[in-house]
Amino acid sequence: MKNLIAISQHRKPADFILRNARVADVFSLVWKTADIVVAGNKIVAIDSQGRYQAEREEDAEGRYVIPGLMDAHIHIESSMLTPEQFSRILLPHGVTSVVTDPHEIANVAGATGLQYMLDAAKKAELDIYFMLPSSVPAAAFEHAGAVMKAKDLAPFLVEDQVLGIAEVMDFPAVLAGQEDMLEKIQLGHNRRMIIDGHGAGLSPTQITGYRAAGIHTDHECINAEEALDRVEQGMYVLIREGSAAKNVKDVLPAVNSYNARRFAFCTDDKHLDEIIQEGTINHAVALAIKEGMEPLQAIQLATLNVAECYRLYEKGALAPGYIADFVMLEELETMKPAAVWKSGQKVAEAGMMLTQNPVKVTVPDSILRSVHLPELSTADLALPMKGTYANIIEVIPNQIITKKLQADVDVANGYFKPCIKKDYLKIAVFERHHLRHTKSVAIVHGLGLKAGAIATTVAHDSHNAIVVGTNDEDILAALHALEQINGGLVVVEAGKVLAQMALPVGGIMTNIEAQQAEQQLQEVHKALHMIHPTCHFHLFLTLSFLSLPVIPSLKLTDTGLFDVEAFRHLSVDASN
């Protein structure tokens, strides 16, 4: 503190000055031509008069400089990278802090998985903050790899990285006042922490129930009407733009100059290849600007609003006393970074990291061997039908919600028969954690495979094995390959594995470097286009959400087809 004061009063030189910058003032929404004066990891001054000296200097040459971007809600596991590698693909895009919910790995490996993520995050160059997962499992009627109650979460509250309780997904448990759920929420309230929400499809009255429980945010709004209802009831709305769910364009009309401070941007789930290609929050800001939002307003949503929502009061702005996270832009409208500083040090330039790869955290062996499937045959895939009229999951491209479709399907000898022409395919979920032998089979429309099958152990949020295909033989081949690689992504045609990507860390992440992982993922995408040449949405990520029974309307878990709106299981056969 003495050193910072001395530098601020010109008694000592600063460590670094970025001169001649057009600095974003996210408090007043104006640009200032000034020098950014840094000592250690803090900003000492925003100096418009050139009064400070430093040991190191760089000239911004009039380029725009903004605070480091912040992701208000992301599941790092959905990038398929460990935290150390995730950090290295995000920083070059100007994202310097994220708030993560590790419920994906916790649903696979419980407290062991959660501790691993916390340890790995400490090695990352990015600032990674945690919300403790409230949804392990996401719902009581499916089988995950672990169960975490309030007593299991409590020991992690002392971690400096922990900010609160993560997205509360089981809204019936909240509204019914179930003790297990309320105990988790109360953990956060006892420490005056944030409670994140998950209000997919909830009515205004149900949101009122969420607010009565002290739930603070929602990232599930898919239109302006939902967003305005949440803001009017005192919530922060986290506008999502990920791989499977892209909501910025539909939610943005809700934001105006009066309520903008209650909005922020988030990613939720985004795959490795898309992060490398376009980034995360930088992409959302650029999209908002393209849609007509004033650039400084969009930047405020992505910086100061996130910091204040999560009470990170030293972040989110370029001003004295704030952490020296900032981004010099090549272009304002596209949010293309020229260089990125993290805690006062330049860490990325021209899209490339300047630092060495960090030392990897050792992954516990139990996490590396988490895929356990029983011996399977075509009999396990049989879907008996009394008639031809069926309840069908209908996919909506670029959304994680689905529709409930009822239609006539092909039936042979009393069993459902997939039809490529009508795009009625077979989908199945198999429990893969503890050999419980639970499984379910149903029908999906809208995925559009023309041949073969695809399978993955990335299946939100319980992460059982999920597979979809045009025939039983390829479905079985895909499941067999999935177990051999200890989880991941598999594409099969005519009994042959066209491509696969191993994700041995809990069946949802790889422990190889990001660039190598991207190459493997590109091979998977090439194989996908062989069996679905016209695919225009993220097929694997869409598939991974078809097993999440807290997102409307129809989903499939290892216990059966589930009607989320009626909150009950449903027979595939609708002929009765």
Image (tube, grey):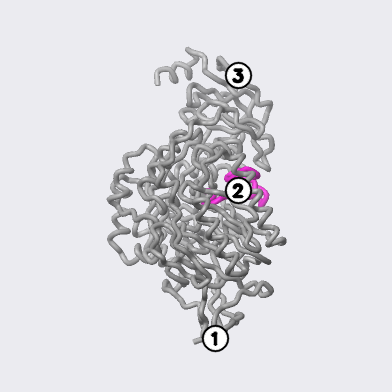
Report the front residue among 530 and 85.
530
Please tell me which of labels 1 and 3 falls first in the chain: 3
Quarter containing the N terminus: top left
- Range shown magenta: 264-292
Front: mark 1 or 2: 1
Q: Residue at 62% across / 59% down in the picture? A: 492
Q: Relative to 47, is 422 on the left or the right?
A: right
Q: Relative to 450, is 404 on the left or the right?
A: left
Q: In this view, does 41 lie above or below 392?
A: above
Which amino acid type is shown beneath numbered disc 3? Answer: Glu
Q: Is residue 534 magenta?
A: no
Mark linked to residue 387: 1
Q: Distance between the residues labelled 1 and 3?
A: 76 Å
User: Is there any visible trace of residue 249 in the rendered image?
Assistant: yes
Q: How far apart are marks 3 and 2 (CA)?
A: 31 Å
Which amino acid type is shown beneath numbered disc 2? Answer: Ala
> For mark 3, what is the residue?
57
Please tell me which of labels 1 and 2 falls first in the chain: 2
Front: mark 1 or 3: 1
> For mark 2, what is the residue?
284
Identify the secondary structure beneath mark 2.
Answer: helix
